Amino acid sequence: MINFNENILEDNALLSVQNRGFAYGDALFETIKISYGKLLFWEDHYFRLMASMRIMRMEIPMNFTMEYLEKQIQNTINASQLSNASSRVKLTVFRNEGGLYLPETNNVGFVISVKLIENDFYITKEGAYKVDLFKDYYLSPSLLSTLKTNNKSLNVIGSIYAKENNLNNCLVLNTNKQVIEALNGNIFLVKGKTIKTPPISSGCLKGVMRKQLIDIIKTMAEYELEEEPISPFELQKADELFITNVIVGIQPISNYRKKQFVNEVSKTLLQKLNVKIRLS
């Protein structure tokens, strides 16, 4: 089932071809993990969405409170009979129909979809996970590149490239040839007692899971956190690399080209992340 502007519909319901999210990519989305009906990190998702809508000059409805949207998500979960399971929710907000590049209105609508997932909490990912650089196209760092919009052409083409080359993922470069993220999440690099992740100014996604891990790392006296640009040359020298997003949590990288990595820090962070969720 889906929730289209408060109306619960079958998940095969059709959007108009004039929908601006479809026609121009004029939409934002949040992907949220639900554990037994509980929205994980909902406050961070909500405030990122509100900030993104302001940047996109979308009119934020008066009723778009945190409580209202949470209720709409819960209604969708209940209608899909997933209130006692774990699921992946996608909340998409789009500018209403009308106009060409210049919209006729800045008012918005929304659609919520939900899909069952297996893991209730985050688990350690073992086994091979191979990545390489995606160099066909580069991301231009700006405030827009940090948003989760429907314009994800680079990620789509990069994912096809990864499949064609028997890779599990690719790392994205910005126009300054800096490593900024993976195709489906933020990137962290461990070298000795330093944990490094690219700054938002480099163009990476302002990830919700990225924020959780930064907060956790700052409490660990044995490690130093750096939000600094990462060059491709640093990847070969790293002890550990991992990718983060709210669905998988932490995905360790086992291989970058001929370099192999351990996953000790990612295991420790994953344990702390699950403890944080249980206590919240």
Image: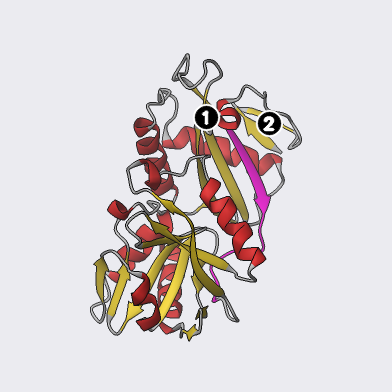
The residue that disc 2 covers is 8
Quarter of the figure with residue 277: bottom left
Q: Is residue 205 positioned above or below 187 on the image?
A: above
Q: Residue 19, how many percent across, how many down?
A: 60, 25
- Left or right? Give the position of 14 relative to 267: right
Q: Residue 111, how many percent across, how many down?
A: 60, 33
Task: Report the amino acid beneath label 1.
Answer: Phe
Q: Is residue 98 visible?
A: yes
The mark found on residue 198 in the picture is: none
- The residue under the point 71% across, 43% down is 80
Mark 2, residues whose alpha carbon is within 10 Å: few (<14), some, or many (≥20)?
some
The residue that disc 1 covers is 94
| Of residues 199 and 216, the one drawn nearer to the viewer in this rendering | 199
Q: Residue furthest front?
A: 136
Q: Is residue 165 positioned above or below 31 on the image?
A: below
- The residue under the point 67% across, 24% down is 17
| Of residues 7 and 29, the one drawn nearer to the viewer in this rendering | 29
| Of residues 242 and 3, the one drawn nearer to the viewer in this rendering | 242
- The residue under the point 65% across, 49% down is 83
* Element assignment for label 1: strand
- Quadrant housing the N terminus: top right
Mark 1, residues whose alpha carbon is within 10 Å: few (<14), some, or many (≥20)?
many
Q: Residue 141, how many percent across, how many down?
A: 34, 49
- Left or right? Give the position of 80 relative to 65: right
Q: Which residues are magenta?
A: 111-124
Q: Is residue 144 positioned above or below 210 on the image?
A: above
Task: Report the amino acid beneath label 2.
Answer: Ile
Q: Is residue 115 magenta?
A: yes
* Element assignment for label 2: strand
